[in-house]
Image (cartoon, grey):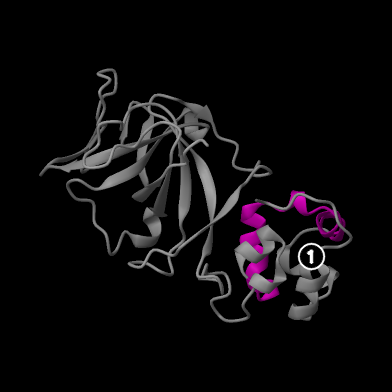
Amino acid sequence: MLNKCRMANWLAPFLAVSKLSQEQLADELGVSRATINRLANDHSKLKLDRAREMARLLGTTVEALMLNDPSAGQDSDQAAEIRPSGTGLVPAHVAGTVEAGAWREVDELDQSDLQWISLPPDPRFPNVTQEVYEVSGDSMNSLEPFPILPGSRVVALPYEEIAGRVPLRDRLVVVVQRTRDGGHTRELSIKQVEFYGDRIEFHPRSSNSKHKPIVVQHDSWADNGITVEVKAVVTRTMNELPF
């Protein structure tokens, strides 16, 4: 979980390693020193985009900053890359809820509720970021061989990181994002790919007939003001049983 506690200058250990002063960090980031002062005294104000900027400057990792754990930092030219920890696990953030037909407003600046969990690295892509999505709705409850049920979580790899190695193909299970209203509203859903010569179809696998496929022509990923994007490739599901 993201540490939201107020604390006295939580940045100090990171600054000590980097040999930067707080004022120098502010200058490098292009923000006011008052902004960095407020951030240094309230870890909950740290957002993911800002952590990505800071990781390189401080010689640490994004997850070390977000978890406020200097021991997770690694001083190297790949410091911002997520890597296995000493426990064999890597942090992954909960990226949102997938629910076919549910359009939600996008607030990219509000990441105060960002959650982190620990997962084993994907053996096929050990240096690729992993994301977790909460599943709502029944649009994939008939997926074979393993249905994806409401209330479960799925683990996924951001497609922008693996697109060169994993082309879209039949039966691939993906997180699809559709945006409208100039990008201010979006739908995240899980679909299975059906690849054709002139188009790609993203299909629900559901016992509920209300769920329909998304059809995209190869030469156009936008239709009627709605833009379609493959956000991630789903690699596995996670289910917690009540006890």
Q: Where is residue 209, by image quadrant? A: top left
**What residue type is disc 1 on?**
Ala
Where is residue 10? Give x, y as percent.
82, 63
- 31 is higher (above) or lower (below) than 230: below
Rate crowding at label 1 as few (under 14), some (14 to 19) or many (20 or more) other CA atoms within 10 Å: some
- Closest to the observer: 146 or 57? 146
Label 1 residue SS: helix
Task: State left or right for residue 196 relative to residue 225.
Answer: left
Q: Which residue is painted at 25% across and 40% down in the image?
A: 192
Q: Position of residue 54 (x, y in %)?
A: 68, 65
Residue 57 lies in the magenta stretch: yes
The residue under the point 58% across, 74% down is 79
- Determine whether, in the image, residue 101 is placed left or right of residue 203: right
Q: Which residue is mark 1?
A: 26
Q: Is 124 placed left or right of 87 in the picture?
A: left
Q: Which residues are magenta?
A: 33-60
Does the magenta portion include 126? no
Quarter location, residue 16: bottom right
Quarter of the image for residue 125 reads: bottom left
Camera-side residue: 194 or 4?
Answer: 4
Residue 188, above or below 120: above
Residue at image position (51%, 28%) is 104
For this orientation, the residue located farthest to the front is 243
Front residue (pair 203, 67):
67
Name of the residue lying farthest toward the top: 210
